[in-house]
Image (spheres, coloured by chain):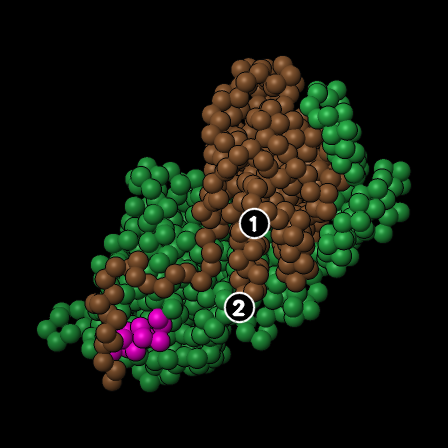
Chain colours: A brown, B green
Amino acid sequence: MHGAPAIIGGYGDPHDCKPPAGRAMMQRPARTPIVGRRVQLMATCLCDAFHDDVAAATVEVLEHLGCEVAFPEAQTCCGQPAFNGGDWAASRRVVRHAVRTFAGDDPVVVPSGSCAAMLFHGAALEFEREPDLGEVEGLGRRTWELGDFIVNGLGVRAWPGRYACAVALHRSCHTRGTASSEAAALLLRSIEGVRLVEFGEAEQCCGFGGTFAVAFPHISASIGDLKLDNIRAAKPEVLVSGDTSCLMHLGGLAAREGVALRTRHLAQVLRDALGGGP
Amino acid sequence: MKTQPIDQAAAALPPETKAAVYEGSKVSHEKRTKLLFDHYGDPDRLRALAGEIKQHVVENLDTYLPAVEAALAANGAQVHWAPTAEDACEAVHAILRARGARRLVKSKTMVSEEIELTEYLGKHGIEALETDLGEFIVQLGHDRPSHIIKPIMHKNRRQVAELFERNGLGPYDEEPGMITQRARQHLRHRYLEADAGLTGANFVVAESGRIVVVTNEGNARFCLAATRCHIVLVGIEKIIPRDADLALFLNLIARSGTAQQLSVYNEFVSGPRAPGQPDGPDEMHVVFVDNGRTDVLATDCRDILRCIRCGACLNVCPVYRQAGGHAYRSVYPGPLGAVLSPLLLGERFPEKADLPKASSLCGACREVCPVDIPIPDLLLRLRDRAHQEGIPSPGTPPMGVWSLLATQPVAWRAALAAGHLVNRLPTRLIPVPALRAWEAKRALPEWRGGEFRKWLKARRERGGGGRRPPR
């Protein structure tokens, strides 16, 4: 018969145990402090291809805050499509390209919670056993989602201008556990004229999920329809999010159903508030 | 258009079933959240602590298993080790055969579903009767559980009343109190006729050899009270270090699983009837089931072995709510099942390699997990594994060409320009399946590839600044 091993009783403080194998999801790593006002803009592939005005608004918002915005021309994508699709080798190639493209010490600001999470969380996961993990984590520490950067990076607590509108804020899933959603809500609430309306099942996903949207079209659309029902019940005039992808999915569903839904990215609302409204 | 099996299953789900699953899971999730946050200032700290304790056990199973064996033996229980499902079934069968037992009453255990114990015993002439109400209804209808806590999540009360009527349990009556009463009356006699009782174990405490079983119907207690032989069927990962840890885990499992402060019946079993004790089974056997768990331990997804089977991740999961449990083709559905089920298959992983794809990676499961399992990370690891093993994934766009473009800035910009074709051609003429899958459900916005770069260049040439006319 085996004797009771020493570990029993001596186990004491559970904090002594080995750290979990997985990384904490979406928990921001310690960040490189912001020095100066120079930033690099990561426009995202969706803005590059479809939503140029979101990227333009991001530039204008950052410049309004006195930032000097650099746009590295070689930029493409954060690598997330292949990461989520399961082709990590392909994703790592793209992430390595991003690491080269966004070199230096300046913070990288991206108008997307999902791309930001890819760089500070997802990339570190897929580079766990790679020799250049350190460089990848370095980029992650410098990467900020736009709302998070404005509020927690630059310390801005209120937004000027006016935006007379009932706004529903979709807290995108890839900002769970980060400061982004609260930052967006704080900024929106501070704008004169904005009335933030709450809607049901706000913690639920919009159903986009990257490649999920095309591999699971029925489930993706059904989840989206529920989200639309919940949002519409709150009767907002505009749906706002920090993620273009969620808006593209929800707006696309609404348009296909013939009941248009006005969608705006947080950057667009901030820029338009400076100009006096929607 | 090729899509994933779970998407097809969800599309084929009858509206009545879908409504039952959606309502059941939504209500369970909302009650759980309210209870946790009403009672605790920071439930996330409890989840993190519980996660660390379970991870500690998982990482030290080699030490804990012999410790548990010693503690159980000291309590007078007999320990059996079952490397495979068949070994586990045969271990239970051998115990029953030795006693000449023909009738077994069992309380709810997912491991028994996993190893298909009831079917195995049936082939050997032993009747195993489910005594948990949900599982009893599943057994009556020759159905399969669709949820690990609420096995009949997919049924509404009308369907249950019809099933009872068909099986001679009384005329149609869909009132839940009546359904419960009829099941109770039917089952009470069967406990008395049984030769042995089988339970699972929610926790096995290493330091004391205590078996802890939680139920809300008291059926586990009946399984023990009326029979002379208690068999515990349990996965090797269900160990917790100390009795003191139960304070944390019993609080979390009840709140997470059924939105209760504590389950109604908590059994603490420390061995068979001791000399001088008036009651209790004469024999107690604990069958530890591996069935692929040590293989899981060897992977970078071992965190899933922390799972205490509360079902909270199923309830919150938007995909589970749409597809229901049967769509996962596994005893363990939902986010936990999407990780665990393919892993438990070992070399047969490809058979269920599609399950980890069934997630929008929204992370809601991670937020509710009482042991803080990073489920989305594990789903992603398994997607990468499936890709590396070359397992086809219907509907998932190939990433080779995309990654080539995304690493060649010149080619990327050329593609942004060429993409304008999308605005002029009907998408059915464009040979990109993903585009058609998108368009089947959603309008595609206008392609404006490269427009931002042009705008920025013009702005910089003008010397920056300046308002841009609204579009």
Query: Which image quadrant: the C terminus of chain A?
Result: top right
Residue identifier under label 2 = B343
Residue identifier under label 1 = A139
Seen at 53% across and 34% down, the residue is A36
Res B458 visible: yes
- Residue B62 is covered by the magenta coloring: yes
- How many neighbours does mark 1 have within 10 angstroms: few (below 14), some (14-19), or many (20 or more)? many
Residue B18: image location, x then y, percent: 58, 46
Residue A228: image location, x then y, percent: 62, 33
State the CA–CA distance, disc 1 to disc 2: 33 Å
- Residue B385 picture quarter: bottom right
Residue A208: image location, x then y, percent: 64, 43
Seen at 58% across and 15% down, the residue is A162
Taking depth in this image into account, of B168 and B414 the one nearest to the observer is B414
Identify the subunit bearing mark 2: B
B104 left or right, relative to A58: left
Considering the whole magenta stretch, tell me its main secondary structure: helix
Res B233 visible: no
Q: In what element is the residue under mark 1?
A: helix
Range of residues picked out in magenta: B60-70
Identify the subunit bearing mark 1: A
